[in-house]
């Protein structure tokens, strides 16, 4: 087989593979949605724009977290108690 014939075969194989790939991609593409009427569009816009975030479980601070807030390795019991009162107030507001 000559070099030209080999090139023709290689080109034909590449074209075949390209067409197979394009057909696969086309089959995966979702069909276009039908156009909506003006009324449907405005009805869609009138819907809720904001949905409340999901509720998450409250996670309190550890003693290490409190120390990190004050950039200290050890803090006084009074400062720790103040931090716990602030934490309790935040928990009450956010749960």
Image (tube, rainbow, N blue to C red):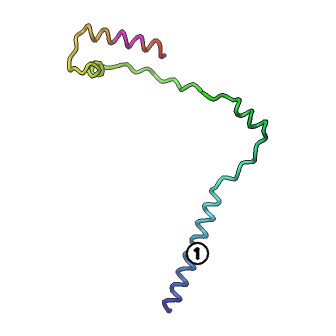
Mark 1 residue element: helix
Q: Judge whether residue 88 is colored magenta.
A: yes
Task: Please name the residue that numbered disc 1 is placed on.
Answer: 15
Q: Main secondary structure of the magenta part?
A: helix
Nearer to us in this view, 41 or 81: 41
Task: Report the span colored magenta.
Answer: 84-89
Magenta-colored stretch includes residue 12: no
Residue at the farthest bottom position: 2
Residue drawn at x 53%, y 89% is: 5
Residue 91 in the image: x percent, y percent? 43, 14
The residue depicted at 22 percent of the width and 11 percent of the height is 76
Seen in the picture, residue 29 relative to 49 is either above or below; the reply is: below
Query: Picture quarter containing residue 17?
Result: bottom right
Q: Is residue 25 above or below residue 54?
A: below
Q: Residue 71 appears at what percent x and percent y?
A: 24, 21
Residue in the image at 66% along x and 28% along y: 48
Q: Position of residue 15 (x, y in %)?
A: 58, 75
């Amino acid at each position: 087989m000559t070099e030209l014939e080999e090139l023709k075969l290689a080109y034909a194989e590449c074209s075949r593979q390209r067409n197979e790939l394009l057909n696969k991609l086309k089959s995966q593409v979702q069909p276009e949605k039908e156009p909506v009427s003006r009324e449907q569009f405005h009805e869609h816009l009138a819907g809720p724009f904001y949905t409340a975030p999901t509720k998450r479980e409250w996670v309190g601070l550890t003693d290490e977290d409190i120390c990190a807030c004050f950039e200290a390795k050890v803090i006084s019991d009074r400062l720790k108690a103040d931090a716990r009162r602030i934490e309790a107030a935040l928990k009450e507001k956010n749960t």
